[in-house]
Amino acid sequence: MSLSAGARLLGLRGEPLILASLSPRRRQLLRMLGIRTEALAPDVPEGDRGAGEPPEAYVERLARAKAEWVPKKRHGYAVLAADTVVFSDGEVLEKPEDDAHALRLLGGLAGRWHEVLTGICVRRLRDERWGTAHERSRVRFAPLDEETIRLYVSTGEPRDKAGAYGIQGYGGLLVERIEGCYFNVMGLPLARLRSLVREMEGTAS
């Protein structure tokens, strides 16, 4: 079966791609590229950042752990895994525990800049070649009153998202400015992924 145009542009030399994530945003981006995927939910604990562990090292470590979780004999060309967090005031903000937690997280981000970091890991199954990288974007929220934050939380959108918002949904109404890769804020930095894949395949350019 011939490769899709998206797979060729990305630099892949085979499909399907095993996505070690059930994130609908990541699946949406790969579908947009026409890349055939199989999605799995890795049994890897999150929220275990070590004391003093830099956030970029943290997201890369989790991405690699998720890629490693996929059995070696799984049918597919390569495994793609990713982990995204929000970083603000020296603190990593992951998915909210409940709506009350989401309210607190969003209140702390309102009217301010924060960073979004995504670690990605590609594991080529035929020869166990690995590549790991991360991407960083800066995002500024508009000033938000309590009523707006409560209304947004009531949509249910923040519940499974790092930092309690999704830029591709209702949360886009809260974002005043972004510096860096938009797709990184969605959870899968496409340009960084292309660079990583092409480096692994020896076709970097």
Image (cartoon, rainbow, N blue to C red):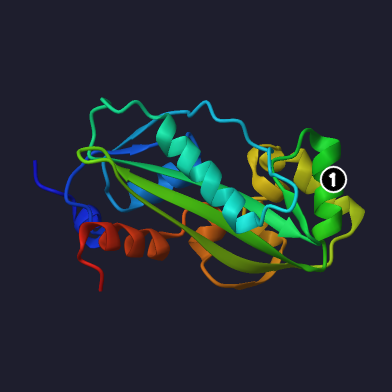
For the C terminus, which image quadrant?
bottom left
Q: Residue furthest right?
A: 146
Residue 169 visible, this angle? no
Q: State the residue at coordinates (80%, 59%).
A: 109
Residue 4 in percent (x, y) is at: 18, 50
| Quadrant where the image shows the N terminus | top left
Which is nearer the eye, 72 or 15?
72
Residue 166 lies, in percent from the top left, at 63, 51
Which residue is depicted at the point 40% across and 51% down? 29
Place of residue 112 in the rendered image (x, y in percent of width and height, measured from the top left): 80, 68
**Front position in the image: 97 or 5:** 97
Which residue is nearer to you in this view: 67 or 157?
Answer: 67
Callout 1: helix, strand or loop? helix
Q: Mark 1: which amino acid?
A: Leu
* Direction from residue 96 to residue 9 in the image, left or right: left
The reply, left or right, for residue 81 in relation to residue 43 is left
Picture residue at 54% right of the left edge, 42% below the top: 62
Up/down of 55 relative to 140, above or below: above
Number of numbered tags placed on the structure image:
1
Q: Which residue is mark 1?
A: 103
Query: Going by the image, does 167 lie left or right of 104?
Result: left
